[in-house]
Image: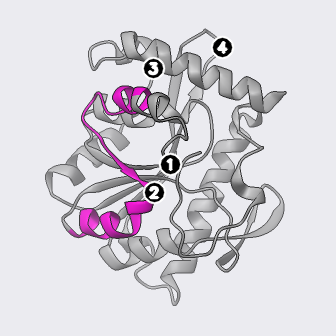
């Protein structure tokens, strides 16, 4: 039942966002990236420094590309196309309205290195399990997650930001919460940067979820591990 409620909320938010969310209206509805993080991310964009934005199946995650663009960030967002092509086209038109690129998960392994190598920003749903990955503890349970994020961040020296959109008590009001932000200097002296990056972003995703567990989409793909080289995507 809760899974269906989340889907209903997400669809409603998506439909309302089509008419309501613009750069000028963003402060009214929420979704403004708090300082100092917005300034830091915009500076990284101007300087062509690669950035990886990581989030979870949390709150109205469908709105992330729209909110990023309205904040002035031009990100390339990995997504999983919907099985219904008409709905997929409708959803894409809303999510890409503020200028973000949507990358089908089938193209992610090629496009993400290209974008990061050119100093761009990518956004990924990163709370996926893997058959063979980095061992972590997430929400009190041992699991493993793909090495993809850690490998890409370490190779391209990306700034890693973990954030999520949280619904507020008032209908169609949101908060964009940043729970961690770290640069390559954080792992420059560790023996295993990939493990460090992975464990740190997973801990931050856990912090996001525990901020309000009712907004987490518990019944998603964590129960169906993917091979470790499979990039994260959306349902």
Does 154 lie within the magenta span? no
Residues at marks 2 and 4 touching, judged by CB atoms closer than 8 Å: no
Q: Residue 162 at x, y = what percent?
A: 50, 51
Q: Earlier in the sequence, mark 1 or mark 2?
A: 1
Residues at marks 2 and 3 touching, judged by CB atoms closer than 8 Å: no
User: Overall secondary structure of the magenta stretch?
Assistant: helix
The answer to whether 24 appears left or right of 177 in the picture is left
The residue at which mark 3 appears reads as 30
Residues at marks 4 and 1 touching, judged by CB atoms closer than 8 Å: no
* Rendered image quadrant of residue 25: top left
Spatial separation of the CA atoms under disc 4 and disc 3: 12 Å
The residue at which mark 4 appears reads as 169
Q: Residue at x 35, y 79 (%)?
A: 155
Badge 1 crowding class, 10 Å Cα cut-off, few under 14, some 14 to 19, many 20 or more, is: some
Magenta segment boundaries in residue numbering: 90-117
Circle nearer the viewer, 1 or 3: 1
Under circle 3, the secondary element is loop
Spatial separation of the CA atoms under disc 2 and disc 3: 28 Å
Residues at marks 1 and 2 touching, judged by CB atoms closer than 8 Å: yes
Q: Earlier in the sequence, mark 4 or mark 3?
A: 3
Spatial separation of the CA atoms under disc 1 and disc 2: 5 Å
Residue 219 can be seen in this image: yes
Q: How many marks?
A: 4
The foreground one among 228 and 86 is 86
Does 91 lie within the magenta span? yes
The residue at which mark 2 appears reads as 105
Q: Earlier in the sequence, mark 4 or mark 1?
A: 1
Q: Residue 81 at x, y = what percent?
A: 48, 44
Badge 3 crowding class, 10 Å Cα cut-off, few under 14, some 14 to 19, many 20 or more, is: some
């Amino acid at each position: 039942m809760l899974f269906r409620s989340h889907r209903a909320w997400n669809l409603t938010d998506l439909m309302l966002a089509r008419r309501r969310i613009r750069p000028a209206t963003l402060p009214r509805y929420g979704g403004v990236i708090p300082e100092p993080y917005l300034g830091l991310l915009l500076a990284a964009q101007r300087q062509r420094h690669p950035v990886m934005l990581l989030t979870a199946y949390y709150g109205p995650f469908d709105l992330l590309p729209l909110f990023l663009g309205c904040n002035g960030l031009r990100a390339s967002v990995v997504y999983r196309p919907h099985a219904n092509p008409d709905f997929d086209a409708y959803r894409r038109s809303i999510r890409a309205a503020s200028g973000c690129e949507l990358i089908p998960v089938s193209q992610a392994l090629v496009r993400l290195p290209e974008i990061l190598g050119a100093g761009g920003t990518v956004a990924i749903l990163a709370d996926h399990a893997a058959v063979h990955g980095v061992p972590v503890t997430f929400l009190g349970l041992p699991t493993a997650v793909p090495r993809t994020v850690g490998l890409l961040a370490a190779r391209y020296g990306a700034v890693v930001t973990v954030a999520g959109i949280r619904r507020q008590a008032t209908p169609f009001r949101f908060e964009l919460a940043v729970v961690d932000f770290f640069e390559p200097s954080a792992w420059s002296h560790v023996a295993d940067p990939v493990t460090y990056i992975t464990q740190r972003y997973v801990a931050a995703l856990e912090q996001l979820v525990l901020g309000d567990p009712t907004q987490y989409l518990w019944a998603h793909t964590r129960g169906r591990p993917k091979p470790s080289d499979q990039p994260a995507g959306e349902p």
